[in-house]
Amino acid sequence: MSGLFPLPRAEVAPGAVHVPGWLSLEEQRELVVACRRWAVGPVPLRQTRLPGGGVMSVRSVGVGWHWEPYRYVRTADGVPVAAFPDWLGDLGRRALVAAYGGQGAGDGYAPDMALVNFYDHAARMGMHQDREERSAAPVVSLSIGDSCVFRLGNTENRGRPYTDVELGSGDLFVFGGPSRFAYHGVPRVRPGTGDPATGLAGGRLNITLRETGLA
């Protein structure tokens, strides 16, 4: 949990909901173990090179699909990516119930891709939209390790207005509905704020679950 008295669920913008401390410590540990397994392959964790020649500061690995700018593919370097496990889909449906309320909130949600990003103390994520999916289903974001500043912007451009949210270990953030295509990014990670009991000695893991709408 995020401290002795976790903060309440908060709607940051229409369709964008922050649920602090949603993942238990045991669930965080289990996700760290799974992410370590995915990180070594079959398609390993890597820094993505952008079409303009820049290299992203985060290291990423895809589950179910591989993300390359700016599309999803089933293979990378001729190797099929790791399969998307059923239990991760179940976790995504539970997340929608927690974020949006009511047992029916997760009905019909069928994520088939997880993008795992690892941030070291110097990593950042510029403002961007998640637009490669053909589905407008919500994106479920899970944080483990060091806290960060998560910046949720508007749907028109990378500038203001935006809202900065502190995401800690175990926090859930869901953006869907009117906020599904909002620009968002991570301008700062706070080193040394994570709990080693999660199994992550340093840095931040972010797991986002997406419904691609692809066959």
Image (cartoon, grey):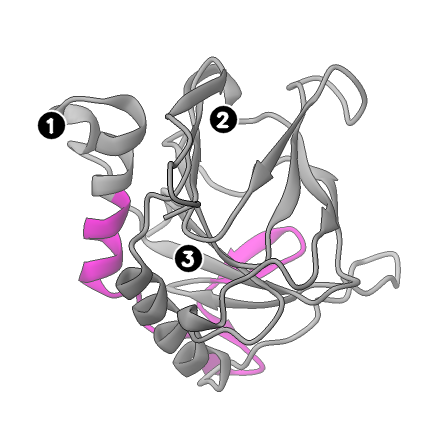
First of labels 3, 1 by sequence position: 1
Query: Which amino acid is tagged 2?
Result: Arg
Q: Residue at x 79, y 17 (%)?
A: 160
Q: Quadrant of residue 156?
A: top right
The secondary element bearing badge 1 is classed as helix
Q: Based on the picture, tell me whether residue 104 belongs to the magenta stretch.
A: no
Instruction: Classify residue 15 as left or right of residue 83.
Output: right
Classify 126 as above or below 54.
above
Q: Is residue 166 above or below residue 53?
A: above
Q: Amino acid at mark 3?
A: Ala
Whether residue 110 is visible to the viewer of this picture, yes or no, is: no
Up the image or down, 80 lies above or below 19; here it is below
In the image, farthest residue toward the left: 103
Residue placed under numbered mark 1 in the picture: 103
Left or right? Give the position of 24 relative to 140.
left
Number of other residues with Cα within 10 Å of mark 2, as a class: few under 14, some 14 to 19, many 20 or more: many
The residue under the point 62% across, 67% down is 203
Residue 119, by quadrant, is bottom right
Q: Nearer the viewer, residue 50 or 147?
A: 147
Mark 3 element type: strand
Foreground mark, 3 or 1, reads: 1
Which segment did they paint magenta?
66-92
**In 3D space, how far apart are the residues under numbered discs 3 and 2 (Cα atoms)?**
16 Å
Residue of label 3: 114
Percent from the top left, x then y, of residue 168? 52, 47
